[in-house]
Image (cartoon, helix red, strand yellow):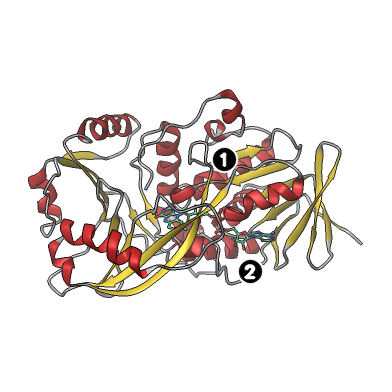
Amino acid sequence: MALVRDVVIIGGGVMGSATAYSLAVSGFSGQIVVFERDPVHQYGSTGLSAGGVRHQFGHPANIRFSSYSIRQYEQFGATMEIGGHRPDIEFRQRGYLILATEQGLPGLRERVRLQQSLGVEVSLLPPEAILDRVPHLDLQGIAGASFCPRDGYLDPYAVMAAYEAKAKSLGVQYLHEEVVQILRSGGKATGVRTAADREVHAPVIVNAAGPWAGEIGGMAGVEVPVQPLRRQLFTCIVPGELDYPLPMIVDPGGLYFRSEAGKRILVGKSDKSAAPGFDFQTDRNYFLEEVWPVLAERMPLLDRLSLDRLWAGLYENNHHDHNAIIGAHPDLDGFYLIGAFSGHGMMQAPAAGRALADLIQHGGYRELDASAYAFERFAAGQLIEEETLF
Ligand SMILES: Cc1cc2nc3c(=O)[nH]c(=O)nc-3n(C[C@H](O)[C@H](O)[C@H](O)COP(=O)(O)OP(=O)(O)OC[C@H]3O[C@@H](n4cnc5c(N)ncnc54)[C@H](O)[C@@H]3O)c2cc1C
């Protein structure tokens, strides 16, 4: 016999679990079930993420979403406490230092002004002030930087696990089954079928399947413009002289690096030539040829690092404007998406989950307005213009 629930969420990564938690914590009285096919999240983007969290964007909606999320992360342990246990998401607010060339400086200055106008504590630093913060940098070709001390990085897996645990404590059900079919009746989504041949009927189906969101759209017979794009990360053991914690440093070419536990740094640089696909292969040559030389030029002492670990995960990319899609699908009633965050899902998850929960529960946005992220923007030609994507 089919189960009947009020909300089915497909995907128990950070987005699915943030949505489930946000619904459950705000008095939603319906029954919520999350389907997650992989209890250890081996390939999910959340656990493979760099965990960078920043206010520093160029579009007001992105700045507002990050600001909200960072406020949540600052009190996450207390909010997610269960029975006296406070999860530690290792949120290190060491700042994001975004470096700019002479050519990039006017744009950076404009973004800083916008961020400040929205209440972000961010400033422009001249080269001397950059070196005060990170003395080992070589600032060849760098004219300035922006820095926000409340930015930083955290443990993405711990965030996801905390949301899941808290959602469960509030009555959300998690089932480790794969959704293989979306049930529909005319223009309405009515439920799902799983690989275990379980049918669940619900008036609200949330597609929170990360890089697989496009496939879930296919099961529903509608277009969901989310493609998987391989992105690699590297951890390296660094020389002993680097004995102070680094902020997240972003080079003008998109290379980024930060401290990692135990005399290590974590480094990434998006391979813009990667073709869409479910490709988790790692490539040491990419590190040797494209990453390490840029890193060692920016911080010469890193000429002497040793590569410790490398892995690949998938950005969930919408090829129209590379920003999130949140809301109801225009071609199928009751079918919602929270996805397409590319490389900035961790810094938007608390806000995105809150906004979607409000939309489902109240039929409109309350605490946060996510209408800039609606599907409808593509047809209306109102793409999100955002330059600070790495
Ligand atoms: C290398 C890398 C670096 C990143 N760095 C950052 C960063 O520094 N800062 C930042 O903010 N963001 C970063 N991101 C992005 C961020 O990690 C993602 O935007 C975010 O984790 C997406 O969460 P999600 O829940 O949508 O997806 P996921 O975590 O992928 O969760 C989706 C889940 O759906 C499940 N699923 C899929 N299909 C089905 C099905 N049919 N049935 C049941 N379950 C299903 C999957 O098993 C998966 O667990 C990075 C991502 C990558 C890959």
* 2 or 1: tag closer to the N-terminus: 2
**In the picture provided, is 101 more to the left or to the right than 253?**
left
Q: Is residue 321 visible?
A: yes
The disc labelled 2 sits on which kind of residue? Asp
> Which image quadrant is residue 287 in?
bottom left
Q: Position of residue 325 (x, y in %)?
A: 57, 40
For residue 265, what is the image quadrant? bottom left
Q: Which residue is mark 2?
A: 38
List the single residue furthest toward the left.
128
Count residues near mark 2 (Cα–Cα under 10 Å), then give few for <14, some for 14-19, many for 20+: some
Q: Tags 2 and 1 in contact by the CB under 8 Å rule?
A: no
Residue at image coords 54%, 25%:
381
Q: In 3D space, how far apart are the residues under numbered discs 2 and 1 (Cα atoms)?
A: 24 Å
Amino acid under label 1?
Ile
- Badge 1 marks a residue whose secondary structure is strand
Residue 378, position in %: x, y?
Answer: 57, 30
In percent of width and height, residue 77 lies at 45, 61
Q: Quadrant of the N terminus?
A: bottom right
Whether the residue carrying mark 2 lies under 8 Å from ligand 1 is answered with yes
Q: Residues within 10 Å of mark 1 (few under 14, many from 20)?
A: many
Q: Is residue 159 visible?
A: no
Residue toward you, 33 or 180: 180
Element marked by disc 2? loop
x 44%, y 50%: residue: 343
Does residue 282 appear left or right of residue 228 in this picture?
A: left
On residue 311, which mark appears? none
Residue named by callout 1: 325
Q: Nearer the viewer, residue 223 or 260?
A: 223
Q: Nearer the viewer, residue 247 or 284?
A: 284
Q: Position of residue 387 (x, y in %)?
A: 36, 37
Q: Residue at x 59, y 65 (%)?
A: 165
